[in-house]
Image (cartoon, rainbow, N blue to C red):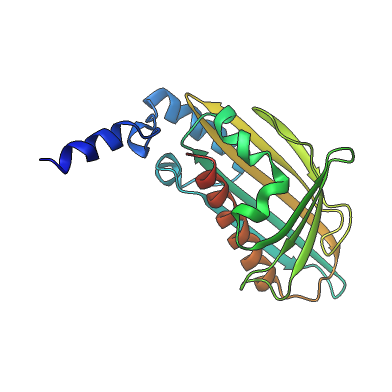
Amino acid sequence: MKLLIPWLIFCSLQGPTWAAIPTLTESQKAELFQRAQEWWQGPVKFQEDLSRGEVVAWAEARDQSDSQQTLSTKVIGLHPRSCAWGLAKISRYEHYSQHMSFVRESRYDEKTQTLSLLLEHLVLPYPMTLTLKLPRISGPSVTPFLFPHGIFAGLTGTIHVASIGNRCAYFLRASWRGTSTKLSPLVIETFAQTLSKIGLEHLIRISTL
């Protein structure tokens, strides 16, 4: 009992825990699934996974010709906290290298709204630098982004952030058609899907507490 009392006091002084995370009402679940269907623009068979907090990602790459390739990718996740809570950290793009092991360097130029990332991961054929034109997201919104140059020059996409009750839904869609990367479609699909999934999972995790 002497050991138990200090432990209970310690627990009571801690910040919010996962047990305190609000669950979705039936109407909020319906709103989440409706948004997911609008955003995904395809068959949605992951409603329960999404409501449980799992991040769902998809990617498809194709060889259009010997010199042209295409890529489409989507990722969606439900944050346990509000948009204001999560975005306080998620919008600090320049800190991504501190939170994600596969991001070796991250820099953000506020004037040009340019984010530069150096990525290194087992699913990547080599260390890859990605440059995005991306405004800093401060609340629920639909935000466009662009890869102005690099291996996927011309790739465009949107990031949707929506408040669902006291929680926040994140959805990213991107598409690209350009000069062949000389990588197989399977390799492109694998790293696009893997990194988008674990990237959003990491961001949700570090911005929850």
The number of discs equals 0
Residue 38: quadrant of the picture: top right
Name the residue at 60% across, 62% down: 101
Residue toward you, 99 or 163:
99
Where residue 96 sits in the image (x, y, percent)? 66, 51
The quadrant of the image that shows the N terminus is top left
Where residue 153 sits in the image (x, y, percent)? 86, 58
Name the residue at 73% across, 75% down: 126
Residue toward you, 21 or 27:
21
Furthest residue in direction left, as rendered? 1
Residue 180 vs residue 187: left or right? right
Name the residue at 58% across, 49% down: 200
Residue 28: quadrant of the picture: top left
In the displayed structure, would residue 90 be above or below residue 124?
above
In the displayed structure, would residue 95 be above or below residue 33?
below
Residue 121: quadrant of the picture: bottom right
Name the residue at 61% across, 73% down: 122
Where residue 79 sits in the image (x, y, percent)? 50, 38
Where residue 88 sits in the image (x, y, percent)? 62, 34
